[in-house]
Image (cartoon, helix red, strand yellow):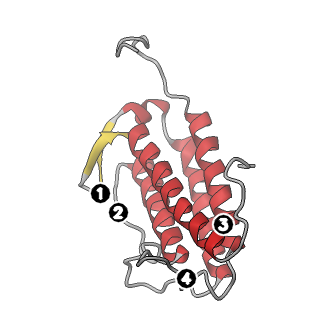
Amino acid sequence: MASDSHPRGFLFPVDGLLEHWQGHRRVTRRMIQAFPDDQLFRFSIGGMRPFSDLALEMMSMAAAGIQGVATGKWRMVEGLDHHSKGAKPATREDLLARWDEVTRQIDTLWPQIPPQRFAEVDKAFGQWEGPIYGLLLYWIDNEIHHRGQGYVYLRSLGIEPPAFYERS
């Protein structure tokens, strides 16, 4: 399709994007719940990180990302990044509580973002330059990628993972 197929002033469907993202986050939350307590923080295959670390990365990107989109200030959130020196969650309940807090942050900040902001080009964390909607799509793709690793983990543990298409 030609690059001029959309008229100037076309606005990205931001409400649909939020629901899409939150749908993926709901599936990932069910993935966290599906892991056995003794495997969530230590099980890995082939040197990949445990699913708890993958979830922390997803939370870190989401929390810092939504703050950057809303404010234009791109800072990592201490205690969420899997590389963080801060205390990592030690239990599923703590991990889920942090997941739910990030969800609330997204739901609170999203309506404050002017629709035209999604088309603006910004440089996230001083490294990744692109339109805001593209950065958001990358965060969603990254979550799907890591959730795929979680699917492999769960199946190797003999556990049926949650259906990826059930996003409610």
* Mark 2 → mark 1, Cα distance in angstroms: 6 Å
Q: Amino acid at mark 2?
A: Arg
Mark 3 — residue?
A: 31
Which numbered disc, 3 or 1, marks the residue that appears first in the sequence? 3
Specify the label residue 43 is tagged with.
4
The part of the image, by quadrant, that contains residue 85 is bottom left
Q: Position of residue 17 (x, y in %)?
A: 57, 38
Which numbered disc, 2 or 4, marks the residue that appears first in the sequence? 4
| Label 2 close to label 1 by CB (< 8 Å) | yes
Q: How many marks?
A: 4
Which numbered disc, 2 or 1, marks the residue that appears first in the sequence? 2
Nearer to us in this view, 77 or 32: 32
* Residue under the point 71% across and 49% down: 167
Which numbered disc, 2 or 3, marks the residue that appears first in the sequence? 3
Which numbered disc, 1 or 4, marks the residue that appears first in the sequence? 4
| Label 2 close to label 4 by CB (< 8 Å) | no
Q: In front: mark 2 or mark 3?
A: 3
| Label 2 close to label 3 by CB (< 8 Å) | no
Q: Amino acid at mark 1?
A: Phe
Secondary structure type for disc 1:
loop
Horizontal arrangement in the rendering, residue 11 relative to residue 154 (left or right):
left
Q: Amino acid at mark 4?
A: Phe
| Label 3 close to label 4 by CB (< 8 Å) | no
Q: Amino acid at mark 3?
A: Met
Secondary structure type for disc 3:
helix
Quadrant of the snapshot with the N terminus: top left
